[in-house]
Image (cartoon, rainbow, N blue to C red):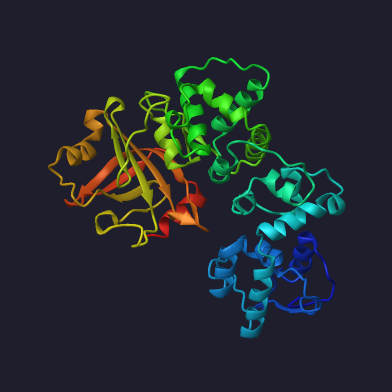
Amino acid sequence: INTILFLRPTDSLTVFLQQLGRGLRLSDNKECLTVLDYVGQAHKNYNFYEKFSAIAKKKGKALKEEIESGFITLPKGCHLHMEKQAKEYILRNINSFINNKTTITNKIKTLEIESGKKLSLTNFIEFYNITLKEIYKTKNIFYRLCVNAKVKEDFNDIDEQSFTGGMLRLINTDSIRLLKFWINTLENYKENKTISFNDSEEKMLLMLHYTLYTKSPKDLGINSVNEFLQRLYSNKVIYEEILEILKYNLSHIKVKTFNDNLSFDTNLEVHATYTKEQILASFGKNTIGKQYPLREGVLYIEDKKTDIFLITLNKVEKHFSPSTMYEDYAINDELFNWQSQSRTSIDSPTGKRYVNHRESGNNILLFVRENKSEDGVTSPYTYLGPADIVSHSGSKPISIVWKLRNKLPASIAKKAEKAL
């Protein structure tokens, strides 16, 4: 089959992909598949957005850029060509279907009628194939969107405004250890308001604090982790929504994580993602005080003999100064090329600490992200774990090749190699 005619309207992505799939089967002397769509222009409300999102595995602005660029990131051997007029028509259509506050609110109104399921965050995500990021990019709590849709009673949680940004940080959590601990703690706190925690558990709760709040505990008048939980629990509606997000993330883990096997507990899992604030909280000097200062993506923690490198692969000049435009990339799934700050010489105490870290027993920990932000939202870092020096060259900056103790998973390696 080398030509398909679409004559059947459908809102089901499964049916759409099944129809398209009839023509995607390989055959000798078959160069391409031609698709003639007689349905797309039959109704102004035909949804091209979800169809192309399912094909390209991208959403929002990223999908528009993919169409405009000619689908350059499709797998090898795949090519999708659209005539200029068709592309312009589809882009106009997609603009009207990209999920925003208005479209999401309208979908909330009709969820129970269309799906036959009770309104909940999880049911909403799964029925409409919407991501948590699309919901919280509206700068609204999901329950507030339900209130706006007139399907829930109004509420008055004191930290609602603070949590609109906090939810965008929370939805990136994919550490099984963190998710399980946070869920168990929040569930237990509803029954027992006086729970004792060890030092490691207090740091994990501090990580939750800096996920939800931008201010330090003391700046909010919080002097203990139990006071933090009390403050959080006072936001009763959002407290339950936070729990639902954590449970959803735990049931949709996509990465295999590992223990970093250091001599002290970092509270982190290799290949899980963390915000800068979560990373700093996990190594915090104490549970409630100020965090370590971190400048230019490097931090040395003397009492733990540990260097932390926070690496952004794709650097944009407006976000980085000439002294921070380092050459960082994955050579393969084990080796990573990294450059020090431009003022670091090979003979400086810092330079010597880097290149002689094996002899001194110093830890080198790498965290990496592809871009500083995506769709206007600050990107978290993937913890690559401990690394050991293989070779070095130059001075001011020093170029170092590190060997990772845990190989990069394919999804991360692909992103890290793009900068090469």
Image quadrant containing the C terminus? bottom left
Image quarter of the N terminus: bottom right
Q: Which of 165 and 183 is in front in this view?
A: 165
Q: In which quarter of the image is residue 386?
A: top left
Which quarter of the figure has residue 117?
Answer: top right
Where 307 falls versus 77 (above or below)?
above
- What residue do we see at 21% from left, 52% from top? 342
Residue 142 in the image: above or below residue 364: below
Q: Quadrant of residue 306?
A: top left
Identify whether 407 is placed above or below 79: above
Work out whether residue 389 or residue 235 is closer to the camera in this orientation and state it. 235
Residue 260 visible in the shown view: no
Kindly identify the residue that appears in the image at 37 percent across and 42 percent down. 366
Furthest residue to the left? Answer: 347
**Is 401 left, or right, of 176 in this rendering?**
left
Residue 405: x and y, percent? 39, 38
Q: Is residue 377 left or right of residue 358?
A: right
> How many marks are shown on the rendered structure?
0
Can you see residue 133?
Answer: yes
Q: Where is residue 383 in the image (x, y as percent from the top left)?
A: 44, 41
- Residue under the point 31% across and 44% down: 402
